[in-house]
Amino acid sequence: MVADRAGVSPKTVSRVINNERGVRAETHARVMAAIEQLDYHPNLAARGLAGARSFLIGLFYDKPGDYVSEFQTGAVQRCRESNLHLMVEPLEAGSPDLGRAVSTLIGQLRLEGVILLPPLSDLPVVHTTLATAGIPAVHIAPMHQPADAPSVDTDDRTAARQLTAELIRCGHRRIAFMLGRAGHRATEQRYLGFADAMQASGLSIDAQLVQTGNFEFTDGLECARRMLLSPQRPSAIFASNDDMAAAAVCVARQMQLALPDALSIVGFDDAPVATMIWPQLSTVRQPVRAMGRLAADLIIQHEPHRRGWPQPMPRPHLELELILRGSIASVRAHNA
Amino acid sequence: MVADRAGVSPKTVSRVINNERGVRAETHARVMAAIEQLDYHPNLAARGLAGARSFLIGLFYDKPGDYVSEFQTGAVQRCRESNLHLMVEPLEAGSPDLGRAVSTLIGQLRLEGVILLPPLSDLPVVHTTLATAGIPAVHIAPMHQPADAPSVDTDDRTAARQLTAELIRCGHRRIAFMLGRAGHRATEQRYLGFADAMQASGLSIDAQLVQTGNFEFTDGLECARRMLLSPQRPSAIFASNDDMAAAAVCVARQMQLALPDALSIVGFDDAPVATMIWPQLSTVRQPVRAMGRLAADLIIQHEPHRRGWPQPMPRPHLELELILRGSIASVRAHNA
DNA sequence: GAGCTGATTGACAGCGCTGGCAATTCCACT
DNA sequence: AGTGGAATTGCCAGCGCTGTCAATCAGCTC
């Protein structure tokens, strides 16, 4: 069809579409014109079948949420630049036949690569199944970086250190820390950053003031209560995410504490809730969309050559952005 | 491969996979066993190419967010039951070459159907492009229901009426209303429901107490301020979504109003923020995941026959769930 | 047991494109 | 003009399945 109109063979049209070299400029133009006029769109399935590829990248996630949506938007953007498409697949991290589910997906779709959002990025079944099938996978913020696959991370530790340092700079000495879910890289890194800053300033961490909140708002309520009821109340709370920080705000309010003067609260993620409460949360913004973009990029960079990953294994760390808002106040002399 | 092992022709394997009738039970079992043993997964691209279909449904959205992620999860669930896959595609509602983008997508992917999330569900370009290509589309909560395509809606009007009635039952008489963005079906329906309830109780709506907030938190702040500064302060505020309701909470707090006693506030959507502030918002929960499921279902029901949509055009309305939480208080005698 | 009908099954071509080559064209240089 | 080598282009087969239709088979009837 297009070939006829351009007066060339189908193969030449194929060459133009795939941007192969060795097509005379004049021919190229003629073909492009024909494509344009006929509003021709090559059939992905046929291209895939003939070329033994799929033009598909998978994005596997567990729980839906803001994060997923934002991440996938970034990933799709990058995919488009290379004429690929993103296949989103919710997967149950706890399911017993997760492995089977994954192998069905990759078997049917012949995905060219897969992006794993946490906590899937830490499940051995997923990793093994993918590796066995020879499908390149990029792990997002994994707890344990796989030796044979790249990962995309953010430097949570540094950001947590900086945010803690800011609290210290404002005169806070007793700072409570609310941990996220065990087994998440973020949980570990954010705590380490907090500890770094405390240690650097010669401050001790009161074990009573470190509570585990699993990243959930409701857990955060409980943690905050325990913290604020402790004999020596902290002057600041660092929550590992904004949901829990919001919980701390609620509890403080119920206890009639004047915010932020009587209690500074900071979170992490810059979730929507961070700016929907008063005082607005100081927090750390994650470049989620950029991470999606980068993850897709790693897959795409890898793809054309079909060799292993470049060495050293790419492990980009994206920078986080400190967002200081009204939830931090300086400690008055009598509190310090 | 599988055919050999089962001692049948490839065509019979195909029949089994596609669940076609006319395969003897014994043969069917033999093929299934072979499939199982070989861990065989049919190649989607090949199936698509040969069968002139794609096994792909598109989900087009504009802005990422919680809603999208939740919706798509429901849609994928339904797709899996029919061995289909969901292709998510962020599209810029404002872009001048939106039409071209859509036609490229459907041209390449040969989507079997498309689900349009608002505001895309109201853009004529999208609808026309899809219709021209003969691709079934389901419009989610469109402002104007297209005559030739089904839509999935929620009964916002009824829910808004019920929630307003609840406020009235608690003794509220002066109730302010915060409108969403103009041109959204939700904006209109929620207001109408509010007006229904007011009228049913013989209450008048003070024009000063109806403000437009565009569904944004920041706009909500401004609206709430105007409402609460008005000569006769309302005893309750109905915000068209939870983000704006959260804004009202913030403003009320800054004005030292005791919540919920001095001011009741209700929202809509049951967004995450609804339970992350104090008092927790009374609101209306949208069955987002169920909507995703249903939208996919409509496409899938339509597909096998390749005829037009059934008549009358399916326009399911899902029920919303009233969620009553702490943000509503009864009006004291002296306020009423 | 022949004959007939409907249920199963298989043979074959082809979906729309891309690899792997062979054929052709182009161009610089003798 | 003749020649060799590189640059273009086309031919052919086939990717892994399914649509079509013909072939075969099982179960009955007489």
Image (spheres, coloured by chain):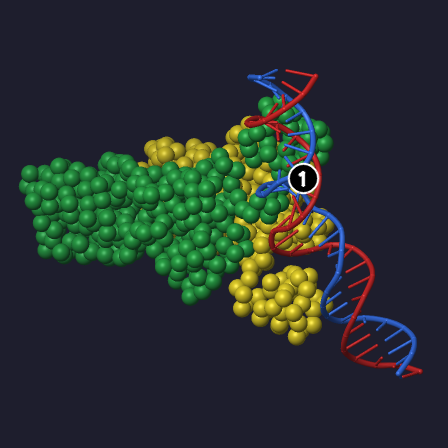
Chain colours: A green, B yellow, C blue, D red
Q: Residues within 10 Å of mark 1 (few under 14, many from 20)?
A: few
Say what amino acid the circle numbered 1 marks: Ala
Which residue is identified by label 1?
Answer: B133
Please, is residue B262 above or below residue B41 in the view?
A: above
B263, A253: nearer the viewer: A253
Q: How many labels does the image show?
A: 1
Residue at screen point 17% across, 38% down = A166
Residue A168 in view here: yes
x and y percent of residue A17 in the render? 59, 34
Please, is residue A182 above or below residue B277 in the view?
A: below
Horizontal placement of B131 versus A98: left or right?
right
Residue at screen point 43% across, 55% down = A130
If the image is split into quadrants, where does the N terminus of chain A sit? top right
If the image is split into quadrants, where does the C terminus of chain A sit? top left
Horizontal placement of B320 versus B127: left or right?
left
Horizontal placement of A43 versus B274: left or right?
right
B166, A92: nearer the viewer: A92
Please, is residue A4 above or below residue A158 in the view?
A: above
Residue at screen point 40% across, 58% down = A128
x and y percent of residue A264 in the render? 19, 42
x and y percent of residue B205 in the render? 47, 38
Residue at screen point 12% across, 51% down = A205
Q: Residue C17: name its quadrant.
A: top right
Task: Check disc 1 and report its element: helix, strand or loop.
Answer: loop
Label 1 is found on which chain of the structure? Answer: B
Residue A217 in view here: no
x and y percent of residue A98 in the render? 44, 61
B267, B61: nearer the viewer: B61
